[in-house]
Image (spheres, rainbow, N blue to C red):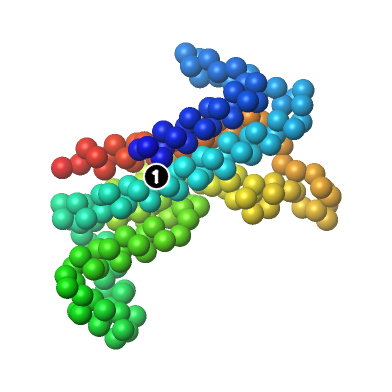
Amino acid sequence: MNFLLATVESTERLGALASVALFPEQRTLIPIEDLDPKMADFARSMILFAGAGIDATMKQLVRDCLRHAIDNSSSAAREFEKYVERLLRDGAAATAQVLCSPNPRDHLVERYAGDLTGGSFQSSQQISRAAASLGVDAPSKRKATFDRLFRERNFVAHELDLLDPEVHGMDRRVRSVEDAWVMAEDAYGATLDLIEVVGNRD
């Protein structure tokens, strides 16, 4: 939760730096990027912060809750069993490591957590897999919210937000600070919803 709160705070500060007026009671923003095209960089930064914060939050959620989920959720236990089956099919080396560890089950749970959190969360599919490991379904609405954020995040992080250089030269995607804020806020809400579902489950 601390990762998520810190990310929201950073996004809000970027909005303030961009001279964006926020009205909480109306949930609306007044962007000024039309007056200064450089404001688009604030929008890009907000998207990158949002993606990084959700990545860190999901990893911590898995580390903190995976063992409890496996012990108390039948669906999480099934996902764990599937993982163990895949791992043991990989060969004798993996099997030997498990059998020779002081506590084979603890070893498997730790290895499972490491596998789930080893990469960067950059798609709704990765978040859905982590949610399933905790015994939680990912509704289609939540998937769409994450897909939108991570698609835009990947445009910025991997393509520098450039359009097709052969067609558009150095032109970059146009995105308002308002769009970035709404996108980030929706993703924060979906992440918080996931945290609450995991936390409220018996």
Quadrant for the N terminus, please: top left
User: Residue 133: where, in percent of width, then height?
Assistant: 29, 56
Q: Can residue 140 be seen in the rendering of this structure?
A: no
Quadrant for the C terminus, please: top left
Q: Which residue extends farthest front?
A: 102
User: Residue 189: where, in percent of width, then height?
Assistant: 41, 33
Q: Quadrant of residue 194?
A: top left
Instruction: Say above or below: 137 vs 7.
Output: below
Q: Residue at x 30, y 53 (%)?
A: 63
- Residue 182 as seen in the image, left or right of residue 196: right
Q: Nearer the viewer, residue 19 or 143?
A: 19
Say what secondary structure mark 1 lies in: helix
Instruction: Say above or below: 136 vs 190.
Output: below
- Residue 6 as seen in the image, left or right of residue 43: left
Q: Residues within 10 Å of mark 1 (few under 14, many from 20)?
A: many
User: Residue 147: where, in percent of width, then height?
Assistant: 51, 46
Q: Can residue 43 be seen in the rendering of this structure?
A: yes
Instruction: Say above or below: 166 vs 13.
Output: below
User: Residue 60: where, in percent of width, then height?
Assistant: 35, 48
Q: Amino acid at mark 1?
A: Thr
Q: Which residue is mark 1?
A: 57
Q: Residue at x 51, y 19 (%)?
A: 27
Q: Residue at x 19, y 51 (%)?
A: 68
Q: Quadrant of residue 84?
A: bottom left
Q: Nearer the viewer, residue 110 or 37?
A: 110
Q: Nearer the viewer, residue 168 or 177?
A: 177
- Residue 183 as seen in the image, left or right of residue 66: right
